Image (cartoon, rainbow, N blue to C red):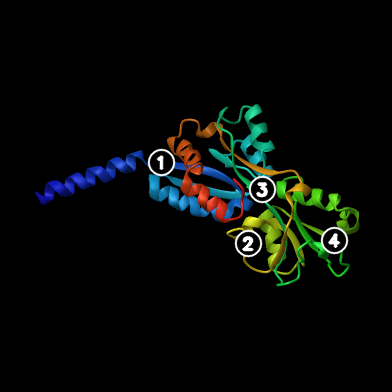
């Protein structure tokens, strides 16, 4: 009897393994921490494995156009996924907003950034890190904020560009830049600054950072890709996303 039970368990495990799949996911750098948690939970709940690559949305666009094997894109904007959809690089009707990002002016120093961002006007600030506005939506938002505050021309010579928002945060966290415009998700937990000091930039100072997900053409026939997109809409995933300061 025990032998029959063991055989049955092996058969069940094999069947589960046959159903489990793998999905290649391109993830905007600002969404690194929450997506790592979501992918781990996704694997536990579904058996599927999400292989994650992190970087700037603009570079992912170029890579997809050049045949990169990504099956799902989690972008830092809504323009890039819409463009890929128009250009036939994605499955129509699969695009949706999985999060709305928040921008924060942040310093690794406690008490350095005031509640209104007036520190930007200080001549003592030598370097301000922003993500490359040509490829990173958070960089585009940072430029918009500086222009709206009438400070862009004043601080332009002090701006240090990160290749993506992850590198931008690195510049600020190491002190190579006294200030950095980074994603709230990188420095906050439960909507509050977890370390250093920061000013959560009012959403009225820049266009909404709507972050869209999309099933790419290479993932059309992959059940694991469709399952991941569905999972992003689940209560478990949404709770993780909200805990990093994103709006839903």
Image position of 44 (left or right of 55): left
The residue tagged with tag 3: helix, strand or loop? loop
Q: Mark 1 points at which residue?
A: 21
Q: Name the residue under label 3.
A: 56
**Residues under labels 1 and 3: Cα distance?**
26 Å
User: In the rendered structure, which disc, 2 or 1, sits on the residue that comes first in sequence?
Assistant: 1
The residue tagged with tag 1: helix, strand or loop? loop
Near mark 4 (Cα within 10 A), the count class, few <14, some 14-19 or many ≥20, is some
Query: In the current view of this chain or complex, which residue is farthest to the right?
Result: 153
The residue tagged with tag 4: helix, strand or loop? helix
User: In the rendered structure, which disc, 3 or 2, sits on the residue that comes first in sequence?
Assistant: 3
Picture coordinates of residue 142 (x, y %)? 77, 52
Query: In the current view of this chain or complex, which residue is farthest to the left?
Result: 1
Residue 92 position by quadrant: top right
Picture coordinates of residue 234 (x, y %)? 47, 43
Rendered image: mark on residue 192: 2
User: In the rendered structure, which disc, 4 or 1, sits on the residue that comes first in sequence?
Assistant: 1
Q: Mark 4 points at which residue?
A: 158
Res. 60 visible in picture:
yes
Picture coordinates of residue 225 (x, y %)? 48, 38
């Amino acid at each position: 009897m025990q032998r029959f039970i063991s055989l049955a368990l092996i058969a069940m495990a094999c069947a589960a393994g046959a159903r489990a799949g793998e999905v290649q996911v391109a993830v905007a750098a600002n969404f690194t921490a929450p997506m790592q948690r979501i992918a781990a939970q996704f694997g536990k709940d579904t058996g599927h494995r999400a292989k994650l690559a992190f970087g700037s949305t603009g570079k992912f666009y170029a890579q997809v156009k050049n045949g990169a094997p990504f099956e799902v894109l989690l972008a830092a904007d809504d323009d890039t996924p819409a463009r890929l959809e128009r250009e036939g690089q994605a499955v129509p009707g699969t695009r949706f907003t999985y999060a709305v990002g928040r921008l924060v002016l942040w310093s690794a120093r406690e008490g350095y950034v005031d509640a209104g961002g007036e520190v930007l006007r200080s001549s003592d600030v030598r370097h301000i890190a922003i993500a490359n506005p040509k490829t990173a939506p958070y960089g585009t938002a940072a430029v918009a904020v500086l222009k709206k505050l009438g400070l862009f021309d004043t601080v332009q010579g002090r701006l240090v560009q990160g290749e993506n928002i992850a590198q931008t945060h690195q510049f600020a966290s190491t002190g190579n830049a006294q200030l950095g415009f980074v994603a709230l998700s990188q420095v906050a937990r439960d909507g509050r600054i977890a370390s250093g000091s920061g000013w959560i930039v009012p959403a009225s100072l820049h266009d909404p950072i709507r972050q869209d997900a999309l099933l790419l053409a290479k993932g059309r026939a992959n059940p694991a890709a469709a399952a991941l997109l569905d999972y992003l809409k689940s209560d478990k995933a949404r709770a993780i996303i909200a805990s990093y300061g994103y709006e839903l």
